[in-house]
Every structure is written in structure tokens, then in C-alpha cells.
Image: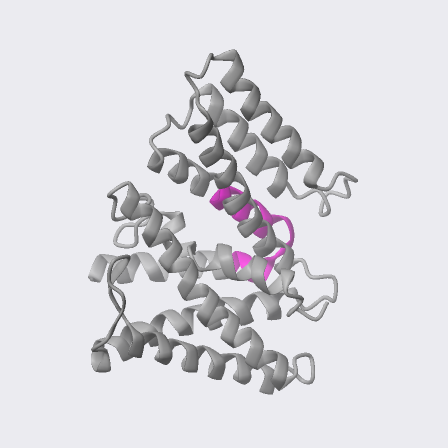
Amino acid sequence: MKQRLITGIIAGIFFLGLCVIGNLPFHILVLGMALIGYYEFVKMIQIRPFSGIATFGFLGVFIIMFPWKLLNLSFTPNWEMIWILMFLFMLMTVLTKNRINIKQISLLLLGVFYIGSGFYFIAESRNASDGYGLFWTFLLLFSIWASDAGAYFVGKRWGHNKLWPAISPNKTVEGAIGGIIIAVLVAIGFAACSGGILGFGRALLIGLACAVIGQLGDLMQSAYKRVYNIKDSGRLLPGHGGILDRCDSWVIVFPFVHIMMLMPY
């Protein structure tokens, strides 16, 4: 527990410090987190991370995450790029005569989209066009963290009914409800301090999204880790696991709130 606490404090200060600075330093940090996350994903699905086929995946994540806008470059990742990446992956099944098969390339492409899009929207939130990127990023992060903390402490104190024991045996229905309530309260608190930037109705929806979708993101990662019989996606953060272990909710929540147009910019 002591190691977990120390690691969490150091990593939190470093991440939030660069988040406050924003711009290129924060974007580069998130790009690095995305590449490490993809490395963890590739290892988990039992493909050699530095094999030729995995290189296409790393390249895809890099292109999605590269700070094109901040460097005033005209390129923007798009569906055409995803199609080209899919074509290259599928071409490898032909060139290797199915030594690299459709299951492997499907997982690699899924990882590019899952991890690349998740971290892309984290960076996009900080670079929000309305100039309040730090506010929106902190709103989502603190609401997600409030949900996690609420689910843990409420579940530990009052939890009796298992939420989804086949996937995550320690989570409870009571904890999940507690996480939702606390996340909503945190989001409403942000609205109250926003000076009119964020209305209470939208804050309620964002708080619900951070809690419900965030908990689903956690369960999704628990589900696929069980397939490969692993506890943690990596060992980068002692006591916490890997990047994907710490960001499992983030990479689902940030795209969701953008796609659902909950962010008012």
C-alpha cells in the first residue's frame, strides 16, 4: 500500500503538472502514454511488440497522436488513414501465407483504434478551441477519479451485492451507485465554480457519463485481461500496474463525451 501511495502521488503530480502546462509538453506526454499503452496491449495479446506486424500498429498510434495542430501541420488523422492501416495489416496475412492470421491483425487494429482514439481525445480536451481546455480536462479526470474512489470506499463499507463477479469479483452494486453519486456531485461542483462556463444540467450528464461509462471501461479491460489470465497490463507503475490499468476509464470516457457532444465547444 505504501509503494502504491508513493507511486500514485509522484505520477499524479507529474501528470497534472504537465496538464497545467499544456500545449506541446502535455501532448508529448500523452503520445508517450499511448505508445506505452499499445506496447502493453500487444504483449497482452501475445504478439512480440517489436515484430514487423506490430510496427504497423505503433505507427498507427503515433500518427493518430502526433501533435499535428500544435505544430501547424495540415495533416489530420481520418478514416482513410485507418483504412490504409487495415489494408497493410490484411496484406501481411497474404504475404506471410497466414503465418500472421486474421485474428492477430484484428486484435492489433482494434488496439490502435481503442488506444489511439482514447488518448487522442484526452489531448484534444486539453487543447480545446474555447481556451478552457484545462477546465474540461480536470472536470473529466476528477469526475472519473471521484467515481473510482466512491465505488471503492462505498463498496468496502456497504457493498454486499456483487456487480459482475465473473468479470470483476470485488466490485459491488452499492459501490457502483456510490461512485455515480460522488462523480455527479464533483461535476456539479465544477459547474458551481465555473462562472457560467458549465451549466448544471450538462454537468449532471457529464458526471453520469464519467461514472457509468468509466466503470464500464474498467469492466471492459477486466474482461479482456481475464481472457489472457493476467492481473495487470504492465509494470510501469509499481503498485498500480501499467498505463492501461490506470487509464482504462479515461480511454473510454474521453471519446464518449466528445462523440455524444457533451463538451460544449
Q: How many numbered discs?
A: 0
Residue 11 quadrant: bottom left
Residue 228 spot, x, y in % from top left: 28, 40
State whether residue 191 appears in this view: yes
Q: Is residue 122 above or below residue 235?
A: below
The answer to whether residue 196 is left or right of residue 9 is right
Q: Quadrant of the N terminus?
A: bottom left
Pick the residue in front: 101 or 233. Answer: 101
Principal secondary structure, stretch drawn in magenta: helix
Q: Is residue 99 above or below residue 35?
A: above
* Quadrant assignment, res 236: top left
Q: Is residue 72 magenta?
A: no
**Which residue is depicted at the point 59% across and 30% down?**
86
In the displayed structure, 116 sits above or below 23; it is above
Which quadrant of the rendered structure holds the C terminus?
A: bottom right
Task: Using the image as rendered, state which of residue 98 and residue 53 is in the foreground.
Answer: 98
Residue 193 shows in the view:
no
- Give how far across and how far down residue 12 sits, in percent: 41, 60
Q: Is residue 139 left or right of residue 167?
A: right
Magenta span of residues: 17-34
Which residue is painted at 65% across and 33% down in the image?
Answer: 83
